[in-house]
Amino acid sequence: SVWTDGLPTLDGCSRATAMGADASRAQLHPGAEPFVGWDDATLESFVDFILRCSVVSVRMSKWNMVEFVGTQKIQQVGDLFALFDSGQEACVNVLPFACSLVLLSLDVPLEARLRSCLRLVDWAGVGELSVADFALLVKASIDGLSRVLVGASWLRRDGIVRELCRRLLPEGSRSASSIVEAALGDEALSAALLCL
């Protein structure tokens, strides 16, 4: 990624496409900026924290996030939650929220980010996802990314969930490892993800 005026842009990947859609004009919303510089260990801790929180509820409160990042970032957490505001008393749907932060952890290798996202919907903890679970993950990722990226309307294109499922899950249920391999092996998709 190329950083300009504190916002990541995809200028370094000016022809990046995701299934024919130009991904090069997306920029990170300023409200999400404090949360994309996480390293491997922080990202792993975040996913573990989300999994512990989501055992109780599919919603996450602003105070849960403050608990994770610390009270010194209470204003930044408020700004981030405003991007996901659904009028639900300072709570957000945890899956889109978590997926967007995981996928935008730019200092973490793409493979690790993908594996972290897959862990979020591996309900049984066996490393295997059904088509429905994978479709939920893709839909949540698209929803989350479209909230934290400005100029990413291509994410909401009709049929994108179906297309990703077709490309990465051609035969029913698959292991998380094979999904990651398929995503990394899909040139257009991995190029677009690397450019986020």
Image (cartoon, rainbow, N blue to C red):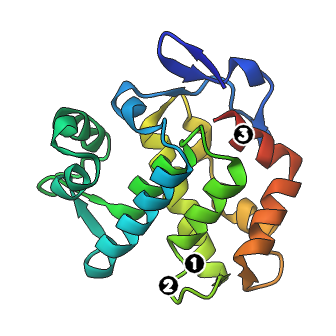
In the image, residue 165 sits, relative to residue 124, either above or below, namely above
Q: Residue at x 77, y 31 (%)?
A: 16
Q: Is residue 101 visible?
A: yes
The residue closer to the viewer here, 148 or 34, is: 34
Furthest-top residue in this view: 5
The reply to whether dot 1 and dot 3 touch (C-beta < 8 Å) is no
Q: In terms of sequence position, does the residue under pointer 3 or pointer 2 come before the other? A: 2
Name the residue carrying label 1. Answer: 133
Q: In the picture provided, is 1 more to the left or to the right than 190?
A: left
In the image, residue 148 sits, relative to residue 67, either above or below, namely above
**Residue 40 image point, x, y percent:** 56, 51
Name the residue carrying label 3. Answer: 194
The reply to whether dot 2 and dot 1 touch (C-beta < 8 Å) is yes
Q: In the picture provided, is 90 more to the left or to the right than 177?
A: left
Circle 1 packing at 10 Å, graded few (<14), some (14-19), many (20+), is some
Name the residue carrying label 2. Answer: 123
Where residue 29 sits, quadrant-wise, is top left
Circle 2 packing at 10 Å, graded few (<14), some (14-19), many (20+), is some
Furthest-left residue in this view: 89
Q: Amino acid at mark 1?
A: Asp
**Residue 182 image point, x, y percent:** 83, 64
Circle 3 packing at 10 Å, graded few (<14), some (14-19), many (20+), is some
Q: Amino acid at mark 2?
A: Trp
Q: In terms of sequence position, does the residue under pointer 2 or pointer 1 come before the other? A: 2
Where residue 54 sits, quadrant-wise, is bottom left
